[in-house]
Image: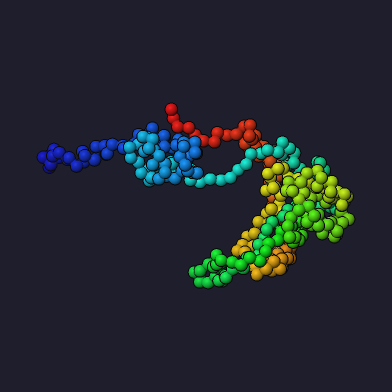
Amino acid sequence: MAALRQEPLPRLRAAHCPGRPAVFTPLQAAQIKALAGQLPAETGVPLSRWSCPELAREAMARGIAASVSASTVRRWLSQDTIKPWQHRSWIFITDPDFRSKAARTLDLYARTWDGEPLGADEYVISADEKTSIQARCHPTLAPGQARAMRVNHTYGRGGALAYLAAYDIHQATVFGRFEPTTGIIPFMALVAQVMSQEVYASAKRVFWIVDNGSSHRGQAAADRLTAAFPNGVLVHTPVHASWMNQVEIFLSVVQRKVVTPNDFTDLAEVGDRLRAFEDRYNAMAQPFQWKFSSLSTWTICWPRLDRHTPDNSEESSLRLPA
């Protein structure tokens, strides 16, 4: 037994030996990550965004590595969750009165105006237009077992119309109308449609929240509304902040549930379906659960806005190490 213990064990000793030496250095990985953090246009590459194969090709062209695969690049980028092939849109805040306009709009959602709560006879309407809803007639097949609805790419054109909507945000009631196009006259027709009926005709005040579209832009639009209906008050959202207008949520519901896929024989069918959907919506809808209050905006959003202004923008891309 003693002799057996003294025999060498080469296989066990070999297990402690180091494996194949690393092919790439940490510096090479860092350089490729830095390259992925630059816009291709900044490097002179005629691409809109990077992919792993393109990054590998560019790394070899720059001499960062003699040979590197796309899978290796992908593994390095995943370590820091770098995804240069993805993108999302954003916009600089350009409205100098963004804070005051946003706070005023959000206060109305909370039924407050100039620091005072709204009365029972005061209402808040959110209004906007959905342009160019087309009547397209497709050969369409209904869904079946293991088969989605099929909408033929070829379609017949039946014209287009504009859908204007006014949404009472606290009553969850929508009023719509159809016009050949948008503009001041169609918008004022929508206002008259709402303001000529109760409870709005005899209300103390009716606040109309709108974006800065040409149909209702500026002080002229506010004066026009008040001249036609003295109890009407036009309130603009900040520039480039139409997302703050709650009617946009309703219009997105219309797009998903009524318009897409667009399959109508003519404009009359478009109007009939939209009217029927309004009745259906008004019968069952609840007010949107708007959680973006003015207080949360001041404490959370404003510091972020300060970092995303044209004069104080965050660094758009990383730079390669010197």
Q: In the drawing, does residue 256 fall left or right of residue 228?
A: left
Q: Position of residue 81 (x, y in %)?
A: 47, 42
Residue 8, located in which quarter of the rendered image?
A: top left
Decide if residue 83 is in sight here: no
Residue 103, located in which quarter of the rendered image?
A: top right
Residue 72, located in which quarter of the rendered image?
A: top left
Quick one: quadrant of the C terminus? top left
Q: Position of residue 128 (x, y in %)?
A: 73, 53
Q: Depth check: 241 or 114 in front?
A: 241
Q: Which residue is drawn at 61% across and 62% down?
A: 260
Q: Depth check: 218 or 253 in front?
A: 218
Q: In the drawing, does residue 94 fall left or right of residue 10?
A: right
Decide if residue 197 is in sight here: yes
Name of the residue lying farthest toward the left:
3
Q: Which residue is drawn at 78% across and 52% down?
A: 184
Q: In the drawing, does residue 181 fall left or right of residue 80?
A: right
* Residue 163 in the image: above or below residue 30: below
Q: Position of residue 109 (x, y in %)?
A: 75, 48
* Residue 138 in the image: above or below residue 85: below
Q: Depth check: 190 or 291 in front?
A: 190
Q: Which residue is drawn at 74% across and 55% down?
A: 182
Q: Position of residue 1 (x, y in %)?
A: 12, 42
Name of the residue lying farthest toward the top:
322
